[in-house]
Amino acid sequence: MMKVSLTGGAVLRRLEKLHAPPRTFLHWRTPLDLLVATILSAQCTDVRVNIVTKTLYKKYQTPQDYVAVPRKELEKDIHSCGTYRNKARFIQEMCARLISHHHGKVPQTMGELTALQGVGRKTASIILWACFGKNEGIAVDTHVIRVSQRLGLTKHKDPKRIELDLMKALPNKKWGEFTTLIITHGRAVCTARNRQCEKCVFKKECPSSLVLGRKDVAKP
Ligand code: SF4
């Protein structure tokens, strides 16, 4: 069997033509909005989060607004996003730190962002790129894991090691763009179940292409 391989650059170039322009799937207007939305999106669909934040953003516009209400009231406002008790606590603790350490503003460094309650490296990478145009990491979510493995860009399962592989495979200035493009491809074509290889631009080279009779190499 002929050995095929795709580079990170080749994948990026084709995805840029296919899915541009890259964008986040969560609706937001300010960095605080996007921080709150990413906390709400844990184990919840973006569609549901976008429904909830439509009214949430009108009621809460500053970190002070989020900490001023009783915890129960915020829990009620975000209830339909699931795990609402933890999420309400994270949001209020995160906002309290924004007030106490950052004059109520969202900080612009990986270290300061990941020191906030409920904010990990994945969320921080999204905030830095989408809000401030900084490429300091690649946000490795379930789509990025699956599509990167299938395309042969990583053999790893651990998100930290996958991120390192992808960061090595792509130019720094493209990390944020690549993240949203590969998520878009994972949602539209290379889905978890029933991937549509016959419609995919990588069908002739992808190590997991059904068109080439390959097996799914993505590790569950
Ligand atoms: S060829 Fe199939 S497995 Fe490979 S990226 Fe495309 S949809 Fe995914």
Image (spheres, grey):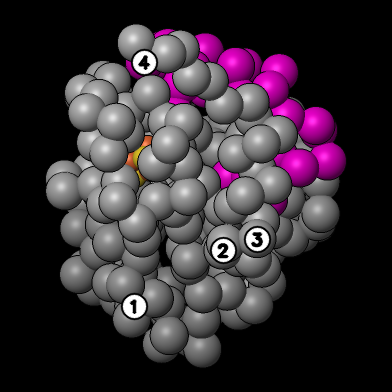
Q: Which type of secondary structure does the marked residue at label 3 adopt?
A: helix
For marks 4 and 2, the one nearer the N-term is 2
| Mark identifier at residue 196 | none
Q: Quadrant of ligand 1?
A: top left
- Write down the quadrant of residue 18 in the picture: bottom right
Residue identifier under label 4: 157
Residue type highlighted by circle 4: Lys
Mark 3 vs mark 2: give the one in front: 3
| Mark identifier at residue 52 | 1
Magenta residue span: 151-179
* Residue 189 % position (x, y): 34, 55
- Write down the quadrant of residue 109 in the picture: top right
* Residue 214 % position (x, y): 25, 25
Mark 4 vs mark 1: give the one in front: 4
> Going 46% across and 31% down the picture, which residue do you hit?
205
For marks 2 and 1, the one nearer the N-term is 2
Q: Which type of secondary structure does the marked residue at label 2 adopt?
A: helix
The residue sitting at the front extreme is 1
Would you call the spot at circle 1 few (<14 residues within 10 Å), some (14-19), or many (20 or more)? some
In space, the residues marked 2 and 1 are separated at their CA atoms by 27 Å
| Mark identifier at residue 19 | 2
Q: Which type of secondary structure does the marked residue at label 1 adopt?
A: helix
